[in-house]
Amino acid sequence: MTSLPDFEDTLRDAVLDEVEREVTDARDQLVGDSEAGFRRYAARNDYDIQHLWQDVVTDAISRRPTGVSARVEWPPLTTLFEYGVDPHTITGNPLLAFNWSAPPEGTRPPGAPSFVVAESVNWGSVTGGIDEARAIRNAHDAMRADLRGDA
C-alpha cells in the first residue's frame, strides 16, 4: 500500500487557501457594493454621509483549521441610514435639553427667537424622517448570490 505523507494536511491547507481567497473577495465586494449604495443614497437625499464608507473597518481575515471568516464594521449610527428613522419625539429630562443657536429656516415658527431651548424635539417633522438606504443589505444579498453562483 502506498502512503501519501501529509496528504490530509496538504489538502486542508489548499482548500483553506481557496476559501480564504473567496472570503477576501466576498468581503471586498460587500464593502464596495455597500459604498456604491450609500453614495447613490447620499446623492439622492443630499446627505453628507461619506464617513459611512470612509470609516468602515475590515479586519484581517481570520483563518482557523476548520474555517475562514471576515469581519466588517461600519461606523456608529450607520443603522439610522441603513434602516431609516420614522419621525418621532425625543424628550429630555432636567439634565438634557436641546439647544439651537440658529435653527434652520423652516424648522421654527415665524417670530420664534433665533436661540431655542426645548425639553423635547419633534425630530423629523419637517424632513419626514430618514428613508432607509438598504445599502448594506442589498450588498449582502448580492454577495451571497455570487457565492452561491446565483448571479
Image (spheres, rainbow, N blue to C red):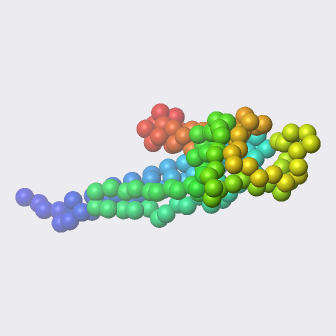
Q: Nearer the viewer, residue 81 or 105?
A: 105
| Residue at x 32%, y 62% (from the top left corner) | 64
- Image quadrant for the N terminus? bottom left
- Is 18 situated above or below 39? below
Compare residues 40 and 52 and report the one nearer the observer: 52
Would you say 73 lies left or right of 9 here?
A: right
Residue drawn at 79 percent across, 44 percent down: 46
Displayed quadrant of residue 107: top right
Where in the figure is residue 62, as x and y percent of width and height?
A: 40, 62
Q: Residue furthest left?
A: 1
Residue nearer the viewer, 112 or 149: 112
x, y percentage for residue 21? 45, 56
Residue drawn 21% across the image and 59% down it = 8
Instruction: Answer with left or right where residue 60 lies relative to residue 13.
Output: right
Q: Is residue 120 left or right of residue 24?
A: right
Q: How many marks?
A: 0
Q: Residue 67's spot in the image, x, y percent? A: 33, 56
Can you say whether 63 is above or below 134 in the image?
A: below
Whether residue 21 can be seen here? no
In the image shown, does 57 or 30 lie closer to the viewer?
A: 57
Residue 67 seen = yes
What residue sits 91% from the left and 39% below the top?
Answer: 110
| Residue found at the far front of this picture | 94
To which quarter of the image does residue 15 belong?
Answer: bottom left
> Where residue 29 sits in the image (x, y, percent)?
56, 49
